[in-house]
Amino acid sequence: MTLAITNVVLDEARVFFEERGSVGCEGTAMISASNGGVAAKLVIPDQRAGAVPHCWVEVTRAGKSELAAALQRDDRYVARIHSHPGQAFHSLTDDDNPAITYPGAVSIVVPFFGLGLRHGLDACAVFVRSDGRWVELLPGPDRDALVVSR
């Protein structure tokens, strides 16, 4: 099954990450879908972040409550999306502290404090959860079969 993420969600994420990046900070958010449909909702929780050169981001206790309250009855978080200051990759911290861990969950890493999203998902690193680990989906037909924007 293909996860379709609306361009509106990706644009909202880009704006948020670029704003965070303008002060040297990373950002994180979650993407939800209803009834396994199109991923059309971006949830940006309350978070703390450290600026360059030691970037980090942490969802606060209030942010965790916001994430829980944001889901409606038939909603499910289908992807985590977060920014990095440089290249897009899954860091050891990303692997050790996943926001979602069910098989098929998606993790999107946006490079250059969100600027990468100006070029769409192809500029991002995309991972899918499989067999208890994150597997990178390289740009191309295999990735497009699993995650697309529209």
Image (spheres, rainbow, N blue to C red):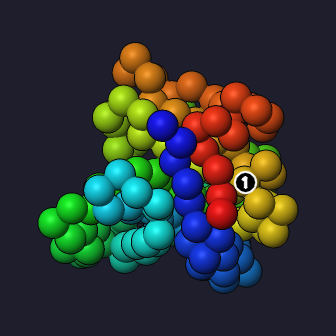
Kind of residue sitting beneath label 1: Leu
Q: With respect to residue 123, does 6 lie above or below?
A: below
Can residue 65 be seen here?
A: no
Residue 150 placed where, x, y %?
65, 63
Residue at the right extreme of this rendering:
119
Can residue 5 be seen here?
A: yes
Q: Please give the residue where the numbered disc 1 appears in the rendered image.
A: 121
Residue 44 placed where, x, y %?
43, 74
Q: With respect to residue 22, does 91 lie above or below?
A: above
Determine the image quadrant of residue 130: top left
Determine the image quadrant of residue 68: bottom left
Report the residue at 48% width, 37% height from top.
1
SS label for mark 1: helix
* Camera-side residue of 42 and 57: 42
Is residue 103 shown left or right of residue 2?
left
Report the residue at 24% width, 68% height from top.
71
Q: With respect to residue 52, does 15 lie above or below?
A: below
Determine the image quadrant of residue 60: bottom left
Is residue 58 shown left or right of residue 24?
left
Residue 27 placed where, x, y %?
55, 67
Report the residue at 53% width, 42% height from top.
2
Report the residue at 52% width, 48% height from top.
3
Residue at the left extreme of this rendering:
73
> Label 1 neighbourhood size at 10 Å, few (<14), some (14-19), many (20+)?
many
